[in-house]
Image (cartoon, grey):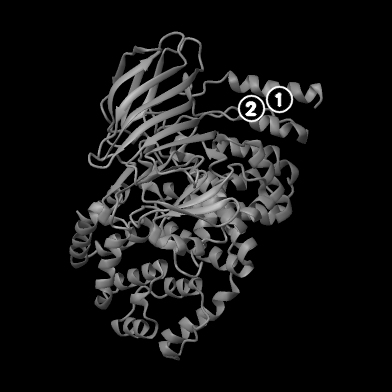
Amino acid sequence: MTIKKLMAGLLTLIVISGCNESSTKTTELIVVADKESKQLEAQVAHHNAQDYHSFSNPDAVKVTHLNLDLSVDFTQQTLSGHVSLDFQRMTPDADTLILDTRDLVISKVVADGNDLAFNLANADNFFGAALSIKLPSHSSQVTVYYNTSPKASGVQWLTPAQTAGKKYPFLFTQAQAIHARSFIPLQDSPQVRVTYEATIRTPKALLAVMSAANDPDTPRDGVYEFSMPQAIPSYLIALAVGDLHFKAMGERTGVYSEIGILDAAAAEFEDTESMLIATEKNFGAYSWDRYDLLILPPSFPFGGMENPRLSFITPTVIAGDKSLVSLIAHELAHSWSGNTVTNATWRDLWLNEGFTTYLTYRIMEMVYGEERFDMEAVLGRQDLQADLDTLKPNDQILAINLKGRDPDEVFSNIPYEKGALFLRELEHKVGRANFDQFLLEYFKAFAFQSITTDDFISYLEQTLLQDYSDKLSKQRIEEWIFEPGLPKGAPVPKSDAFTSVDKARNDWLSGTIAASNIDSDNWVVHQWLYFLNNLPAELSSAQLTELDKAFGLTNSTNNEIAHSWLLICVNNWYQPAFPRLNEYLVSIGRNKLVKPLYKALSATPEGKVMAQKAFAKAKDGYHPLTVKVNEKFVK
């Protein structure tokens, strides 16, 4: 690198370091034309935007490493012990460390063998409470002794009856978005990345696993030690404890679960190693050593959680035919987009989920072919449109304003599918090979960093916008990111596999053919979902009876098909499906599947009574997030 290039990069660093890091305004980058300097600029130019969802003060004192020592008490439903936090003073005179907590009992704080003064503020209704610690002048580590509450929002405790094996209890955590603070006092902001070590003490019959280096052959002795050498944001710290067993699926991949579903899970997800190899080929080496899956009980509130090295997965995607494994591709893709390059605040979630959804489609195409890619892209576009039809304009924006809002309350397809569609347009305009090269360089430039939307736009200005100025415009990019809805001319995915489905549906609706004469023998799950999701909103009882008799939809064992069918049945009050509906609601805690059903039921007085009965029966087995999201419908 020439002196001119180096000085240009250093000048950029000086400009950035001279700004107020807590400011929400971005500092304009000095654009260096030479391509060799782009990576240097990417590394030094991004800044920390203000995180409205954290009380912490990383601009003054930043935590860099955690060392956890926790005991698991299933009787009291608490984690207790201590965490040592290594920190760096970002300003020389900083004398207070501020951490995020929620419903934690703090017994003492220690540094260099001495008790420290601390203050636990009054709790906010969803942000928790700030823990302020007065720091000794020469200390670089504090240790907080604490225990969690049985109602910790990021921890679910399951009784033996709520597990598959029915013999042992189960514990798992879910930290995203701001729930790590409910089981660890820390700086709970995605812009703060930490390495960590942990010692977890459990009943000897049980196995503990974490989002860290796990040893499948570790003895069950009740004391488990973990290390995460790569710096990760707090929301990716995860723990599970249960009667878990392991089965390898490939050289770097395997699955943990209760023994009863272990073989089925390993068979369903056996292509995980192929997905990993295909992704590496296009987007760079996998940075996390192993990639294993943990199959959780049905109460897990999400499809999956991309905890590094060990994705947490719902059992609802074990369909027996690999039809729902795009979820595995999605969580794997997060190893590049989300875990390695992370959103700096929850306003920037689309940088995680939009990129990851785009990569998901690409992985599915590489492993399963173009037809599968096309079908899943069309279904994703329809899911996006369903949200665009119901969300307020401000909630249709990629860089969404979340100030004063609970990030759990604004979950939608916007950051996922709109973000992916935006990237698909960039791909179409510059060409796939060129866009793949851009992604490869992007993941390298920001590896193990947390960035903002503004950082991304600045990087685009130095790369694609500069290299393809005849094909791309900043105005169009800003329209995608900062405006509601979709820009005119946005890509429209299409699938030839759905042409015959459209004809069959239209012929049946017009009375040309009976349902029993629809030639569906070779339809895959995606075609069934397309058939069901595009039926008219209003159907007669006779029509629903005919479909159910012909295809046994009420008894479908595919959870996605069952969800689509049951939603149609609620909206058209098809009572023969209601026993199955009740069973579905009380046996599954995945919000994507149960929330639309509770919402639809609660639209009528009769339906709300059904929803209340199902919710009352299921509530104790639901995760706290599922309870929070759905209880508003049944009140």
Is 378 on the left or on the right of 559, as rendered?
Answer: right
Q: Circle 1 sits on which residue?
A: 9
Observer-nearest of 463 and 295: 295
Crowd around label 2: few <14 · some 14–19 · many ≥20 (10 Å): some
Tags 2 and 1 in contact by the CB under 8 Å rule?
Answer: yes
Image quadrant of residue 30? top right
Q: Which mark is residue 511?
A: none
Q: Residue at x 23, y 39 (%)?
A: 76
Q: Alpha-carbon neighbours of circle 1 within 10 Å: few (<14), some, or many (≥20)?
A: many
Q: Amino acid at mark 1?
A: Gly
From the viewer's perspective, tell me whether residue 403 is left or right of residue 79. right
Task: Indicate the quadrant where residue 554 lies.
Answer: bottom left
Relative depth, front residue between 542 and 57: 57
Res 55 → quadrant: top left
Q: Percent x, y for residue 351?
A: 54, 44
- Residue at the image point whose x is 60% and y is 75% from the top: 496
- Is residue 33 in sight in this rendering? no
Left or right for 36, reference 396: right
Give the residue at x 38% y 71%. Answer: 557
Q: Secondary structure at mark 1?
A: helix
Residue at image coords 35%, 23%: 144
Q: Which residue is mark 2?
A: 44
Q: Position of residue 176 (x, y in %)?
A: 41, 42
